[in-house]
Image: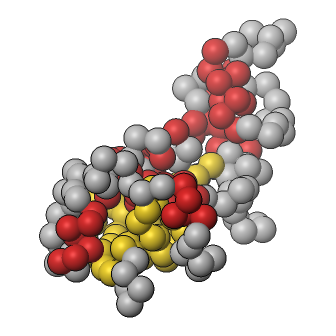
Amino acid sequence: MSTGLPESLDPWRAARSGLLLTGEVALSAFARLSDVIVSSAACARVVQYQLQFARDSQGRFLLTGRIQTQLPLQCQRCFGVVDVAIDVPVQLALVKTEAAAEALPTALEPLLVNDDVVEPLLVIEDELLLALPIVARHQDGDCQPPIAAAIHHSPLAEKIPEPAQLAPNPFAILRTLKSKPTPDDTE
Ligand SMILES: [Zn+2]
């Protein structure tokens, strides 16, 4: 069942009425996330969300639920695509001020609400960005051979001189490979 995802809503009213949002949204809908995932592998992916607006017994306004997806990330070892399962609980308290945020119990993360508006898509994206692994890697033995991984990602594959270069940032490597292939005396 999908209720669709409103672009924005009044979270206070949503909490009073106990609004529940469930459904799927395309992974490609998340602009900031597209900078960190392998976009070419993301086209058919979706993010499943369940977001419940509610008030608790102490009158706090809460947004709880769950977000699940499979993110295609770049393996830091072979630079191939590695699917990382994300399944994060949402435990947010809606607050209007930093002071209110600091007064929350530790089990609740603050969601600062400006102008009485919450954009669910941005909330989901924030949760996904926070859930990203620090280093994405295949399981031992699952890495693609370096050459195959490089061919998969670069149109200049034939000119790649060193298959085993390691760098902290895989995107930097790709940029190097694409813009200025390392001089190769065999041409
Ligand atoms: Zn790998």
Which residue does the image show at 72% across and 30% down from the upper left?
173
Q: Is residue 22 left or right of residue 77?
A: left
Residue 175: percent from the left, percent from the top?
Answer: 65, 24
Q: Nearer the viewer, residue 119 or 66?
A: 119
Q: Is residue 73 visible?
A: yes
Q: State the residue lying farthest toward the bottom.
A: 57
Q: Nearer the viewer, residue 12 or 175?
A: 12
Number of numbered discs: 0
Which residue does the image show at 30% across and 47% down from the upper left?
115
124 up-or-down from 2: above or below: above
Pick the quarter of the image with the C terminus.
top right
Q: Is residue 128 visible?
A: no
Q: Is residue 102 left or right of residue 31?
A: right
Q: Is residue 136 left or right of residue 36?
A: right
Q: Nearer the viewer, residue 50 or 68?
A: 50
Which residue does the image show at 37% across and 63% down from the upper left?
47
Residue 51: percent from the left, percent from the top?
Answer: 33, 73
124 up-or-down from 77: above or below: below
Residue 112: percent from the left, percent from the top?
Answer: 45, 56
Which residue does the image show at 37% across and 48% down from the upper left?
114
